Image: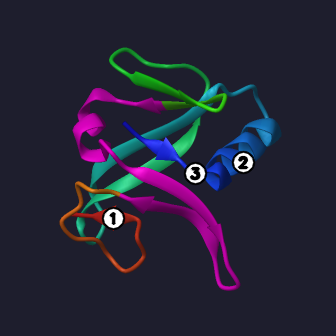
Amino acid sequence: MIQLTDSAVSAVRTALSRAATPMEGLRIKVEAGGCAGFKYLMGLEGTSRDGDIVIDQDGVKLFVDADSRSLVEGMTVDFVTGLEASGFVFENPNATSKCSCGKSFG
């Protein structure tokens, strides 16, 4: 399904430990929008929802809803730190195009 790099796992663990309320994992979702057609949404999540697939990677839970599942199948999520910006990077084999910011795809 989705793979997190070691750097991404570490970033999610850090975010979970700093959350104001207890969170169980990270939700990855795809919605229509962005400059390329679809956009990624990510956020901490307290529990799974009906229809979610739950992936446990190195103790980090990922929640993916049924509508997003086929759009993120086989995706790798990395977390990069650079001089100009830091953040999550998506390598999605289902994307036929993507915008320059890397946060939306077609």
Residue designated by label 3: 5
Q: Nearer the viewer, mark 3 or mark 1?
A: 3
Magenta residues (range): 63-91
Q: Give the side of residue 105 with respect to residue 9, left or right.
A: left
Q: What residue sits 43% from the left and 60% below the top? A: 90
Query: Callout 2 environment at 10 Å: few (<14), some (14 to 19), or many (20+)?
Result: some
Residue designated by label 2: 10
Query: Callout 3 environment at 10 Å: few (<14), some (14 to 19), or many (20+)?
Result: few
The image shows residue 45 at horizontal and vertical percentages of: 58, 30
Q: Secondary structure at mark 2?
A: helix
Q: CA distance from mark 2 to mark 3?
A: 9 Å
Instruction: Tell me which amino acid carries mark 2.
Output: Ser
Sooner in the amino-acid sequence: mark 2 or mark 1:
2
Q: Mark 2 and 1 residues: CB-CB less than 8 Å, in contact?
A: no
Q: What residue sits 42% from the left and 41% below the top? A: 2
Q: Nearer the viewer, residue 32 or 25?
A: 25
Q: Secondary structure at mark 1?
A: strand
Residue 18 part of the magenta segment: no
The image shows residue 61 at horizontal and vertical percentages of: 57, 29
Query: Callout 1 environment at 10 Å: few (<14), some (14 to 19), or many (20+)?
Result: many
The image shows residue 53 at horizontal and vertical percentages of: 39, 23
- Judge whether 18 appears above or below 65 on screen: below
Q: CA distance from mark 2 to mark 1?
A: 23 Å
- Judge whether 24 appears above or below 94 on screen: above
- Which quadrant of the rendered structure holds the C terminus? bottom left
Q: Which mark is residue 104?
A: 1
